[in-house]
């Protein structure tokens, strides 16, 4: 069974901090994604990666960056956290970019 | 541009009643469409995709290209169907999915 593991379920940080959200998958999938999930807005794609060291901007990349040094790990970085980045962050992986079968549990991030 | 609209944020029906969750899309080519579900305290998971033409947990969804819709239906709702449902679209050759805003379905006993 595919497992997508996000390092933290809950995280509280302060405005201006640099924040790292980690995601690891164990099925050798090429494609990995970061979404944020907000009530009334659904899931919005922040960044995705279709190979090691490759990254593509999603629909809302501002204020975020990503890192994919190894195939199994995809990190989301908030360069300088702001209160409007308080949200649920979901990581996903897939062998095909256009179908997402496997999500992590999510990280609920609060920026104070 | 690809867009998915779920017009109902909240939907409440009684157990045993029929359920229809609406999804409309905007895309000029041939889309792939999906329904995802998130039960309370569980991961988001794929429920069904239109190309499979399958019924999962009693749910079906038919792609209507004329009306650009992909509504999710179930003839008799059960309490365990209470969840958040998202419709999603992928365009031809696309590298990503576009999600709708989601509908929270509550089944009342």
Image: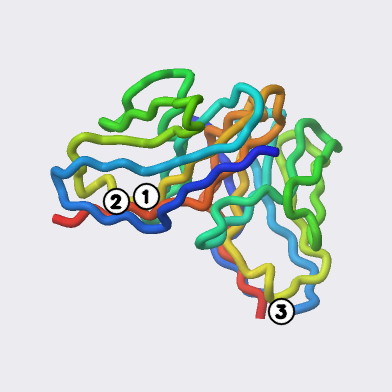
The image shows residue B36 at horizontal and vertical percentages of: 46, 40
Q: Nearer the viewer, mark 1 or mark 2?
A: 2
Alpha-carbon distance for marks 3 and 1?
Answer: 30 Å
Choose between A26 and B10: the one closer to the eye: B10
Quickly name the residue at label 2: B82
Instruction: Say what secondary structure mark 2 lies in.
Output: loop
Q: Chain of mark 1?
A: B
Choose between A36 and A105: the one closer to the eye: A36
In the image, what residue occupies the spot 60% across and 37% down?
Answer: B26
Disc 3 to disc 1: CB gap under 8 Å: no
Q: Chain of mark 2?
A: B
In terms of sequence position, does the residue under pointer 1 or pointer 2 come before the other? 1
Q: Identify the residue at the far right of this view.
A: A53
Q: Chain of mark 3?
A: A
Quickly name the residue at label 3: A14
Quickly name the residue at label 1: B39
A29 left or right, relative to B105: right
Q: Residues within 10 Å of mark 1 (few under 14, many from 20)?
A: some
Q: Residues within 10 Å of mark 2 (few under 14, many from 20)?
A: many
Alpha-carbon distance for marks 2 and 3?
Answer: 35 Å
């Amino acid at each position: 069974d595919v497992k997508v593991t996000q390092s933290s379920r809950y995280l509280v940080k302060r405005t201006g901090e640099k924040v790292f959200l980690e995601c690891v998958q164990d099925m050798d999938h090429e494609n990995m994604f970061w979404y944020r999930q907000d009530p009334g807005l659904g899931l919005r794609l922040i960044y995705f990666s279709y190979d090691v060291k490759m990254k593509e901007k999603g629909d809302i990349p501002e204020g975020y960056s990503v890192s994919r040094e190894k195939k199994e790990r995809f990190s989301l970085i908030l360069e300088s956290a702001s209160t409007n980045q308080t949200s649920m962050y979901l990581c996903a992986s897939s062998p095909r970019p256009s179908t997402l079968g496997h999500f992590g549990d999510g990280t609920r991030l609060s920026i104070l | 541009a690809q867009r998915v609209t779920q017009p109902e944020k909240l939907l409440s029906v009684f157990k045993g009643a029929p359920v229809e969750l609406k999804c409309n899309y905007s895309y000029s080519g041939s889309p792939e469409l999906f329904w995802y579900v998130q039960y309370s305290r569980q991961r988001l998971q794929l429920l069904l995709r239109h190309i499979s033409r399958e019924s999962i947990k009693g749910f079906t969804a038919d792609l209507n290209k004329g009306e650009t819709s992909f509504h999710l239906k179930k003839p008799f709702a059960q309490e365990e169907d209470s969840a958040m449902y998202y419709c999603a679209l992928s365009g031809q050759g696309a590298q990503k999915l576009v999600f709708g805003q989601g509908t929270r379905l509550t089944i009342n006993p």
